């Protein structure tokens, strides 16, 4: 595939959209300034507004937060050589942040038009939840348009003879990650603050945390498919990592402990170009590629996958 430095879709969704949202907030505040109080509410406690600033100061503060935290997270999506799965994660996360900030800013400004006492204006909780949902939808759209521009290097030698071989039937597929039950438990843990806040304050807190919880659950659920030509890892319903069998230098089986070996669950990186899809303790297939990448996937089918890949690589070099 043609070498690229910038992914156009990543630049549009990961950089341009956050910048436009940041500038849009400044423009909107300027247009509405004549109808806003001298100082507007910018922060709320559980019961009332407790932070205030001039509209201009607030507008530029929101713009700075949008660019620093929103674009700061999603900007990696524009880097074509970076790992596709990481770019997809970050563009969705970054645009959720952009949506939360933008939704909260627009709603709070609108609620304070022609208001004499801004301290009586309620927190824009509903707008935060709607912004998070909108950001997630736009982020998923952007993620689906990203392309893998990784440079591929074909292996030139057969795998070491000490590595396993097998004649396992292809394709081999496995849903790796948390089970449905585990995902529900994990999601409930992530949504717990929203459930508590929803009961004592506003149901919109629940909506906000549910969006974030669903996104977090996607980070620990993957599907791996190995066929005669490729190794694919799917996430969020999209192929997120793809390697050709012709790139395989060798595959082995190892026992992996997620926290001890990779520092946690999910998509992990351990040093340069050493990636892991680690979601359980136990056997894992460790695949080395000619381009320098290494991929570790925890799966009970590690023996079959490693053996099949080495056998395919033998046939390639024969």
Image (tube, rainbow, N blue to C red):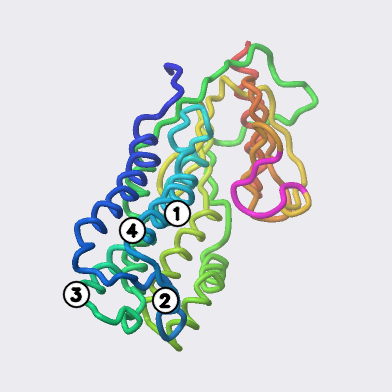
Q: Residue at x 19, y 64 (%)?
A: 34
Q: Is residue 189 left or right of residue 109?
A: right
Q: Which residues are magenta?
A: 261-270
Query: Mark 2 highlights which residue?
Result: 206
Q: Residue at x 43, y 47 (%)?
A: 67
Chain-order first, disc 3 or disc 1? 1
Q: Report how far apart the C-alphas of labels 2 and 4 lie in the structure.
A: 31 Å
Q: Secondary structure at mark 4?
A: helix
Query: Mark 4 highlights which residue?
Result: 56
Question: Is label 3 in contact with label 2 (beta carbons under 8 Å)?
Answer: no
Quadrant of the rendered image containing residue 162: top right
Chain-order first, disc 3 or disc 4? 4
Q: Is residue 212 left or right of residue 155?
A: left
Q: Secondary structure at mark 1?
A: helix
Q: Quadrant of the N terminus?
A: top left
Q: Any mark on residue 114, and which?
A: 3
Q: Position of residue 138 (x, y in %)?
A: 32, 50
Q: Report how far apart the C-alphas of labels 3 and 2 lie in the structure.
A: 30 Å
Characterize the local packing of mark 3: few (<14), some (14-19) or many (20 or more) Cα atoms within 10 angstroms.
Answer: few
Q: Position of residue 261 (x, y in %)?
A: 76, 47
Q: Is residue 205 above or below residue 294?
A: below
Q: Secondary structure at mark 2?
A: helix
Chain-order first, disc 3 or disc 2? 3
All told, the count of numbered labels is 4
Select label 1 or label 4 by which is in front.
4
Q: Is residue 78 left or right of residue 134?
A: right
Q: Residue at x 53, y 32 (%)?
A: 82
Q: Any mark on residue 65, and which?
A: 1
Q: Report how far apart the C-alphas of labels 1 and 2 lie in the structure.
A: 24 Å
């Amino acid at each position: 595939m043609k070498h690229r430095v910038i992914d156009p879709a990543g630049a549009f969704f990961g950089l341009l959209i956050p910048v436009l949202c940041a500038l849009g907030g400044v423009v909107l505040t300027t247009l509405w300034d004549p109808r806003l109080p001298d100082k507007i509410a910018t922060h709320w406690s559980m019961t009332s507004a407790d932070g205030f600033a001039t509209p201009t100061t607030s507008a530029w503060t929101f713009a700075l937060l949008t660019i620093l935290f929103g674009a700061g997270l999603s900007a990696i999506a524009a880097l074509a050589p970076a790992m596709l799965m990481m770019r997809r994660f970050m563009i969705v996360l970054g645009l959720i942040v952009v949506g939360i900030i933008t939704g909260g800013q627009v709603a709070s400004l609108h609620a304070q038009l022609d208001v004499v006492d801004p301290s009586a204006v309620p927190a824009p909780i509903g707008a935060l939840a709607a912004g998070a949902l909108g950001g997630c939808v736009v982020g998923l759209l952007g993620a689906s348009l990203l392309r893998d521009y990784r440079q591929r290097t074909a292996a030139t030698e057969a795998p070491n003879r000490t590595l396993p071989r097998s004649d396992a039937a292809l394709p081999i597929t496995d849903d790796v990650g948390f089970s449905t039950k585990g995902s529900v438990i994990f999601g409930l843990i992530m949504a717990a603050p929203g459930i508590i806040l929803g009961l004592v304050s506003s149901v919109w807190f629940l909506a906000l945390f549910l969006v974030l919880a669903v996104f977090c659950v996607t980070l620990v659920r993957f599907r791996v498919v190995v066929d005669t030509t490729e190794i694919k890892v799917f996430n969020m319903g999209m192929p997120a990592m793809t390697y050709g069998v012709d790139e395989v230098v060798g595959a082995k089986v190892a026992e992996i402990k997620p926290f001890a070996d990779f520092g946690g669950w999910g998509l992990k990186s351990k040093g340069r170009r050493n990636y892991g899809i680690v979601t359980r303790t136990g056997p894992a297939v460790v695949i080395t590629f000619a381009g320098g990448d290494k991929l570790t996937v925890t799966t009970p089918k590690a023996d079959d996958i490693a053996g099949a890949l080495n056998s395919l690589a033998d046939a390639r070099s024969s």
